Amino acid sequence: MENFNPEIVANNLNTKIVGRNILYFPSVTSTNDIAKEKARLKAPEGTVIIAGEQTAGKGRLGRVWTSPKGTLAYSVVLYPSIKQLPFLIMIASVSVVRAIKSITGIASEIKWPNDVLINGKKVCGILIENSLRGNKVDYSVIGIGLNVSTNLKDNPELSNAANLVEESGHGVDSPSLICRLLTEIDNLYVGLSDGRAVFHEWRDNLVTLGRQVRAVSGDVVYEGIAESLGFDGSLFIRQKDGKLVQVTQGDVTLRG
Ligand code: BTN
């Protein structure tokens, strides 16, 4: 998100935790890497790193995340308890669904665990990185990459992706969008309680349940119907042989 003025966002934010400290970098390797560095130096909880562009954006499962200008790339530093940890992917994806709806009117969906789709095409990816010491969380970084006006045609890796401007048919005001995104993360994180409310909202926005899926988790591939969810965010798949398998992380392709 180029030519971004963090002061406009900071002045319009009314959050309790998220966005108390906003740092903007025109060009960085990865906002997650900067956020982790800040977290190690005990940056205030809710510190947000926003990039004009990332030169080495990181995706889930060790992949590269293409993040040219027009993509909103940001990371949030949090210090959750170990109990809150499983809900961060839900908070992150639900915050994006809520903000897209509020700013553009578009209803988006979540593909397990936390890709956000519009009309079946990925508009947003989320990478959460945690540092744990035994049973204690040192810090968590929620990294979000949202295609706003990203040039999809000139990036072959983005041929199946969506961006907000094309999907909505009009321009998107970046400061309003980022304010909404940060406000929604704040509302969900501050109001997390036992996690039930965000779990239900996440589940209700998932496109995955009831669908025929192919899940790749490490070296193992599971195929079947995505039947249900664990409260920890895991996915239960009913295989052809009738066996129910639990997938805690990985990638899911929707079939049919
Ligand atoms: C994925 O879908 O694989 C996750 C993509 C996450 C991309 C975001 S952009 C901001 C933050 N910084 C990174 O290097 N990655 C995340």
Image: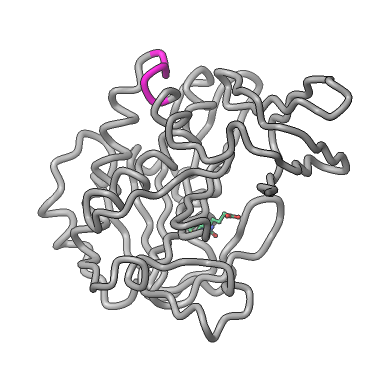
Residue at (23% x, 73% y) in the render: 171
Q: Is residue 11 magenta?
A: no
Q: Position of residue 75 (x, y in %)?
A: 43, 52
Quarter of the view holding residue 25: bottom left
- Horizontal arrangement in the rendering, residue 25 relative to residue 153 (left or right): left
- Expressed as whole percent of the image width and height from the top left, the position of residue 20 reads 23, 44
Report the residue at 87% width, 39% height from top: 220
* Drawn side of residue 58 relative to residue 108, left or right: right
Q: Main secondary structure of the magenta part?
A: helix
Quarter of the displayed picture in which ligand 1 can be seen = bottom right
Residue at 28% in and 72% down: 169
Instruction: Give the quadrant of residue 166.
Output: bottom left
> Nearest the camera: 102 or 63?
102
As drawn, which residue projects farthest toward the left?
A: 11
- For this orientation, the residue located farthest to the top is 194
* 197 in the magenta segment: yes
First to last magenta residue range: 194-198
Can you say whether 246 is above or below 17 in the image?
A: above
Depth check, front residue: 197 or 35: 197
Q: Quadrant of the N terminus?
A: bottom left
Name the outermost residue toward the bottom: 154
- Looking at the picture, tell me which residue is in the foreground, 48 or 87: 87
- On the rendered structure, is 97 left or right of 239? left
79 relative to 171, above or below: above
| Identity of the residue drawn at 35% across and 37% down | 45
**Which of the pair 70/4 is nearer the observer?**
70
Question: Where 24 falls versus 196 (above or below)?
Answer: below
